[in-house]
């Protein structure tokens, strides 16, 4: 009996184990590295899971980034690599899922054992003409894809010795701009294949004097800003000061810095340093923003240092055709003094070259179309003249709410085109700036682009949004009425403070100064004093009137209030309101009429009556008190930008103060 139970249990375990494994594989997509040894070298490929096509987008596809474990890399789908020496190498693959609705499939690193027949005699696996660092430069930074929240991104720090002697020095990498509240990246790890050593703490360089002096120069190249130094008549002290100043500027812009030392860098040798960064969840708040990281190549002595700034756009999905904006949040009060930059990136994802590329970009409401200025673009070509030409050129057309950039007679290869190895050659971009209009409104600035490759249907990009932030003052005035006696009215005026762009729940503070008067009158009858000779007889009554008038100067403060816009024209608010009595005076008058009445008919005297004698009484100040009220209100009107009319009910926590209503108008400006 026991044996049969054990046998049955084994059957269940064996039967369900494959199903369990199958469910796990379906739950998480994975890719697998494949290696094939050939006479030409090691051929790499990947077994990839199916893509989930985003509806309405161009066909989904994978982009590939290979690290071969020897300091070399490739963006090809199926690269062939020749290793510089025998041994064991760890190969990595990072996939980017373009136009896919899932996450990038992870891959496990794979060990490659290299034998003699795979070793290149030159020690370099790349073609002789291929160089990652542009000609005449010493530094370039690129990434395997644009940053997307909660994904890994690999940065390639490529540096080249342009001197005639072996050198050593330091490499600096700056990231996480301080102008953003949240950090966008966390450092994961680095792969140093050329003896680079990461320093625990960045320190200033100690410079050694050289025989020549240098000067600083800058140039724009494609999507980067490059600053480097070249020989001049300047002194070494001046050059050292420039480097120190440039490093301090970088530290003022970025939160994080990583520094490496390098050594034995041969003339003309190009090296690559790989770092893996993890994008943060908080990055999502800055989607479509253009962010940057900055690298420094500083040979010992600091004479020929170079700076490279890489611009990237935060994306919600991997799409090589997109639009980014320099600022996703702008202070409304300073908006008119700031210009906003847009960058439209495009890539030919086809199998053949494109000769005509047109980018139609909408101009957001509130921006001045006459202030548009073209900053940079690629492929580089001259601006088109008015007459038709046959050479490559860029044409610009500005209409009422759209700007169109047209590249004519160019050659933009397709990423799937045979013989195309340089991924960047398939890309282009347009960067322009535009200033806010004088009458800009508190609305979200929204821009989108349509990109046309030759006569193909347009590719519609994402929408770049800029939200206004900051605080907006407002003016408030109204009536204050006692809930138990609506005839007792006070008047108040004041100021409010709330976010410029109020949405969802938001805070609003208020301070108001008010003034009110209230008059109370009481009539009483009392029996006349018979000792008074003017009293004609017993049983007569005299009318006495007591009049009280109270004047109050008060200050209302709303320290805590939360509001929510229910609709575009209706909002609700609740909070606490404190009333402080600044001054309160009560004036009392007593009038005794000369007529005599039988019984208590004096309370309802027949008119007319004789003129009363002058009143007697006085004025006295009352104690200055305060009370806390809980309130709720409703506003109707333009609740996001004002003006509005509202009704508020206040419940007093002090029994000496009445519950009240407030009718008011509020205008945010």
Image (tube, rainbow, N blue to C red):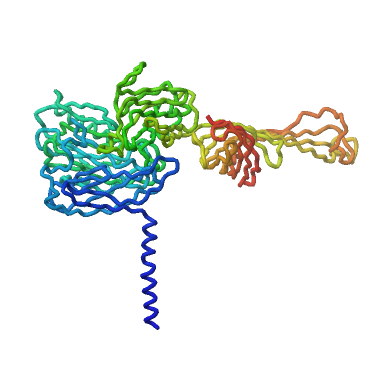
Rendered image quadrant of residue 263? top left
Rendered image quadrant of residue 528? top right
Q: Residue 39, relative to residue 158: is it above or below?
A: below
Q: Is residue 252 visible?
A: no
Percent position of residue 486, x then y: 70, 38
- Residue appearing at x 36%, y 58% in the figure: 25
- Residue appearing at x 62%, y 34% in the figure: 645
Q: Is residue 211 visible?
A: yes
Tell me: 123 left or right of 394: left
Percent position of residue 381, x then y: 29, 24
Residue 12 or 538: which is nearer the viewer?
12
Rendered image quadrant of residue 428? top left
Residue 616 or 494: which is nearer the viewer?
494
Residue 264 or 564: which is nearer the viewer?
264
Percent position of residue 549, x then y: 70, 34
- Residue appearing at x 75%, y 31% in the figure: 615
Residue 84 or 618: which is nearer the viewer?
84
Residue placed farthest to the top in the image?
387
| Quadrant including the N terminus | bottom left
Tell me: 260 left or right of 280: left
- Residue appearing at x 38%, y 48% in the figure: 51
């Amino acid at each position: 009996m026991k044996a049969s139970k054990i046998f049955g249990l084994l059957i269940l375990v064996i039967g369900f184990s494959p199903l369990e494994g199958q469910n796990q594989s379906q739950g998480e997509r994975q890719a697998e590295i494949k290696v094939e040894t050939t006479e030409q070298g090691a051929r790499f490929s990947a077994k990839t899971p199916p893509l989930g096509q985003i509806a309405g987008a161009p066909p989904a596809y994978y982009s590939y980034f290979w690290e071969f474990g020897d300091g070399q890399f490739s963006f090809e789908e199926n690269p062939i690599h020749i290793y510089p020496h025998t041994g064991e190498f760890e190969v990595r693959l990072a996939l980017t899922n373009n136009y896919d609705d899932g996450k990038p499939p992870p891959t496990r690193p794979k060990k490659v054992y290299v034998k003699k027949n795979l070793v290149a005699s030159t020690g370099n696996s790349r073609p002789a003409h291929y160089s990652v660092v542009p000609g005449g430069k010493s530094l370039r930074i690129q990434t395997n894809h644009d940053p997307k929240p909660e994904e890994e991104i690999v940065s390639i720090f490529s540096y080249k010795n342009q001197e005639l002697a072996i050198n050593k020095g330091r490499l600096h990498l700056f990231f996480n701009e301080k102008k953003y509240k949240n950090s966008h990246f966390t450092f994961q790890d680095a792969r140093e294949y050329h003896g680079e050593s990461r320093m625990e703490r960045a320190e200033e360089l100690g410079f050694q004097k050289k025989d020549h002096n240098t000067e600083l120069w800058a140039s724009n190249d494609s999507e980067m800003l490059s600053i480097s130094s070249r020989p001049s008549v300047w002194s070494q002290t001046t050059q050292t000061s420039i480097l120190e100043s440039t490093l301090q500027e970088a530290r003022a812009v970025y939160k994080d810095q990583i520094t490496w030392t390098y050594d034995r860098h041969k003339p003309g040798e190009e090296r690559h340093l790989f770092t893996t960064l993890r994008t943060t969840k908080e990055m999502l708040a800055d989607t479509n923003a253009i962010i940057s990281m900055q690298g420094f190549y500083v040979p010992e002595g600091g004479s020929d240092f170079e700076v490279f700034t890489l611009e990237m756009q935060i994306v919600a999905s991997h799409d090589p055709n997109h639009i980014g904006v320099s600022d996703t949040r702008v202070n409304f009060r300073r908006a008119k003094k700031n210009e906003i930059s847009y960058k439209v990136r495009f890539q030919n994802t086809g199998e053949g070259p494109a000769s005509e590329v047109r980018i139609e970009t909408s101009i957001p409401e509130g921006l001045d179309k006459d202030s548009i200025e073209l900053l940079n673009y690629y492929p580089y070509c001259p601006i088109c003249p008015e007459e038709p030409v046959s050479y490559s050129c860029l044409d610009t057309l500005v209409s009422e709410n759209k700007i169109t950039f047209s590249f004519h007679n160019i050659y933009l290869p397709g990423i799937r085109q045979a013989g195309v190895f340089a991924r960047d050659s398939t890309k282009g971009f347009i960067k322009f700036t535009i200033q806010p209009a004088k009458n800009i409104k508190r609305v979200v600035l929204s821009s989108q682009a349509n990109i046309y490759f030759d006569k193909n249907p347009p590719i519609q990009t994402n929408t770049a949004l800029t939200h206004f932030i900051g605080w907006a003052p407002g003016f408030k005035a109204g009536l204050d009425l006692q809930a138990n006696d609506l005839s007792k009215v006070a008047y108040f005026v004041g100021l409010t403070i709330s976010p410029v762009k109020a949405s969802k729940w938001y805070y609003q503070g208020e301070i108001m100064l008010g003034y009110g008067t209230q008059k109370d009158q009481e009539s009483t009858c009392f029996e006349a004093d018979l000792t008074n000779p003017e009293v004609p007889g017993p049983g007569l009554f005299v009318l006495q009137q007591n009049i009280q008038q109270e004047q109050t100067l008060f200050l209302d403060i709303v320290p805590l209030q939360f509001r929510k816009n229910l609709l575009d024209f209706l909002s609700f608010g609740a909070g606490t309101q404190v009333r402080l009595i600044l001054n309160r005076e009560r004036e009392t008058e007593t009038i005794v009429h000369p007529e005599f009445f039988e019984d208590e008919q004096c309370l309802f005297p027949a008119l007319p009556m004789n003129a009363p004698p002058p009143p007697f009484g006085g004025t006295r100040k009352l104690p200055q008190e305060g009370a806390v009220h809980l309130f709720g209100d409703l506003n109707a009107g333009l609740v996001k930008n004002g003006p509005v009319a509202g009704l508020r009910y206040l419940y007093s926590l002090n029994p000496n103060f009445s519950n009240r209503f407030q009718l008011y108008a509020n205008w945010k400006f």
